[in-house]
Image (cartoon, rainbow, N blue to C red):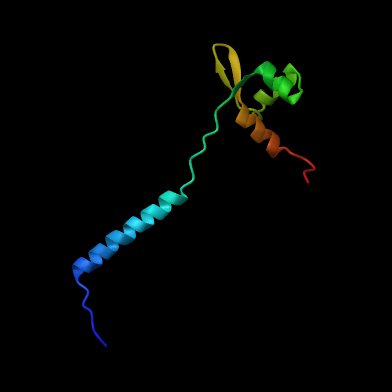
Amino acid sequence: MALEIITLEDLERFGDKLTETLRNIIEENKQPEVREEIIWLKSHQVQRMLGISPGTLQNLRINGTLPYSKVGGVIFYDRREIIKVMEANKRNSL
């Protein structure tokens, strides 16, 4: 049986190859980052979307159910936040 001697240089080359192989595997399996676009809705759009009155929408704002932003007197709602609230309050789901 023949003996092979492994040098420090051999180990370093092996480590470099292993590191490169792992990086390639990680890159191949990396999922592209999906960023959902923010869609800002005005009050009348949210009322129509949810089928609610202006007073009900105001109550949802006041009690903190629906987060909102106010710019120059105009109130905006993030569509994603509305959907989150709807999902969180879902009843009788199958």
State the count of labels.
0
Which residue shows up at 74% across the image and 39% down it? 90
Residue shown at 68%/22% (left/top)?
46
Residue at the farthest front position: 2
Query: Residue 7 at what x, y percent from top left?
Result: 19, 71
Whether residue 29 sits left or right of residue 36 in the image: it is: left
Give the quadrant of residue 1: bottom left
Q: Is residue 7 above or below residue 50?
A: below
Q: Is residue 34 above or below residue 41?
A: below
Taking depth in this image into account, of 20 and 94 the one nearest to the observer is 20
In the picture as drawn, the residue positioned furthest to the top comes out as 72
Place residue 63 in its image quadrant: top right
- Residue 55's place in the image compared with 27, above or below, is above
Q: Residue furthest right?
A: 92
Whether 49 is drawn above or below 24: the answer is above
Q: Is residue 16 left or right of residue 39?
A: left
For this orientation, the residue located farthest to the bottom is 1
**Residue that appears at 23% across and 83% down:** 3
Q: Position of residue 60 (x, y in %)?
A: 69, 25
Residue 10 placement, left or right of 90: left
Place of residue 53 in the rendered image (x, y in percent of width and height, measured from the top left): 76, 19
Task: Name the residue at 72% across, 20% down.
Answer: 47
